Image: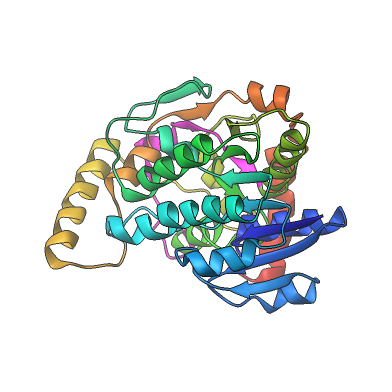
């Protein structure tokens, strides 16, 4: 068995790689950057852009399954910056799978593909895509997800997973940003931090991908999409407090009303667009909504079809996160 993991050097990609190696799977990875640590683990590494069809075709050749994790994530930036890796890159992966007769494709999507600006409370996979999006990332991920699901057939079985707010040891995005802002006194709760959200610990998020591959191998889950979470909806303010406490910091007491945060996001977006600034604003409409609106999900389908059951509680995961933060010195 040989598996390709796109974006194998990233947070989730590396966790999937590690679990595949534990199963004795031969792993290849393609990423834009160079990751010597993957080679030290015994992974065949390739450097390339998934928007480059030839690079993707070369990476897919000889593989039995593809875990397509690579994407451009973010809450700000020109649409084309997201379209190339997220849509064109996914189309390249699908085409390469067809060319090289790969039978299984596991795609990493995001619950944000069904988020417009309204609350999502305990919804399942039947919830529709919104008409409008507040930023390019979820919009392009939704286009890519539909392409993956439409590609499902007897020759190429596909499945899409929607892990929400992945966190844990090794996080190079969410946790470091929260900790850094908290240390600088720049972190505030939006709307009191009372919005209820789902999250998922890194080990469970990665394991869900392997379970999805197993389901495809058995002929189930084909052409389906699944929410993946810890199954522990939590107030976003409490989740943030647990992360900052894991870093040895005090809980956040500062608060910004949700409407003020949204208005600030709109104003900053307008200014940044006029000035053609590429760096991310301190606040955007999408972030304001994400931090002040309920969005948690029903994972019954994943439990039923993938035999997915979270192995970690949030409390247990936070204990591991605290150990990692202390050792990594972030």
Q: Judge by depth and name the residue closer to the eye, 144 or 203.
A: 144
The quarter holding residue 256 reads top left
Where residue 117 appears, as percent x and y from the top left, is: 32, 32
Image position of 107 (left or right of 279): right
Q: Residue at x 63, y 73 (%)?
A: 46
Identify which residue is drawn at 45% across, 22% down.
Answer: 127
The answer to whether any part of residue 154 appears in the image is yes
Residue 164, position as x, y percentages in the image:
55, 40
Depth order, front residue of 205/315: 205
Please check the rendered image and state whether residue 198 is part of the magenta-colored stretch, yes or no: yes
x, y percentage for residue 293? 38, 31
In the image, residue 70 sits, relative to residue 54, either above or below, namely above
Q: Quadrant of the C terminus?
A: bottom right
Looking at the image, residue 83 sits to the left or right of residue 58; the answer is left
Q: Which color mode does the image show?
A: rainbow
Give residue 205's position: percent from left, percent from top.
67, 44
Q: How many labels were placed on the picture?
A: 0
Which of these two is toward me, 128 or 158?
Answer: 158
- Position of residue 225 relative to residue 203, above or below, is above
- 137 with respect to 233 (left or right): left
Res. 322 in view: no
Q: The magenta stretch spans which residues? A: 182-201
Q: Classify residue 282 by image quadrant.
A: bottom left
Q: Is residue 313 magenta?
A: no
The N terminus lies in quadrant? bottom right
Is 263 drawn above or below residue 300 in the view shown?
below
Residue occupying image coordinates x 64% and y 61%? 60
Q: Which residue appears farthest toward the left when viewing the image?
A: 274
């Amino acid at each position: 068995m040989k598996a390709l993991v796109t974006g194998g050097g990233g947070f989730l990609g590396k966790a999937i790689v590690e679990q595949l190696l534990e199963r004795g799977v031969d792993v290849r990875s393609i990423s834009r950057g160079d990751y010597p640590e993957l080679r030290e683990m015994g992974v065949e590494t390739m450097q390339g852009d998934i928007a480059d069809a030839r690079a993707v075709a070369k990476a897919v050749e000889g593989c039995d399954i593809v875990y397509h994790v690579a994407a451009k994530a973010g809450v700000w930036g020109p649409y084309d910056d997201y379209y190339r890796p997220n849509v064109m890159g996914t189309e390249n992966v699908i085409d390469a799978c067809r060319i090289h007769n790969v039978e299984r494709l596991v795609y990493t999507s995001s619950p944000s593909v069904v988020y417009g600006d309204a609350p999502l409370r305990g919804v399942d996979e039947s919830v529709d895509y919104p008409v409008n999006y507040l930023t390019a990332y979820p919009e392009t991920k939704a286009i890519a997800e539909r392409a993956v699901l439409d590609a499902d057939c007897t020759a190429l079985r596909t499945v899409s997973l929607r892990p929400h707010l992945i966190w844990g040891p090794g996080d190079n995005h969410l946790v470091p940003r929260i900790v850094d802002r908290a240390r600088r006194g720049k972190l505030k709760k939006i709307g009191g931090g009372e919005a209820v959200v789902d999250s998922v610990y890194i080990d469970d998020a990665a394991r869900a991908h392997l379970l999805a591959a197993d389901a495809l191998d058995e002929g189930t889950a084909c052409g389906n999409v699944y929410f993946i979470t810890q199954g522990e909806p939590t107030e976003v303010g409490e989740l943030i407090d647990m992360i900052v406490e894991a870093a040895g910091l005090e809980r956040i007491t500062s608060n910004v009303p949700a409407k003020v945060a949204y208005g600030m996001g709109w104003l900053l977006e307008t200014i940044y667009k006029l000035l053609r600034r590429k760096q991310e604003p301190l606040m955007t409409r999408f972030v304001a909504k994400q931090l002040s609106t309920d969005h948690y999900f029903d994972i019954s389908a994943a439990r039923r079809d993938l035999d997915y059951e979270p192995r970690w509680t949030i409390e247990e995961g936070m204990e591991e996160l605290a150990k990692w933060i202390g050792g990594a010195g972030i």
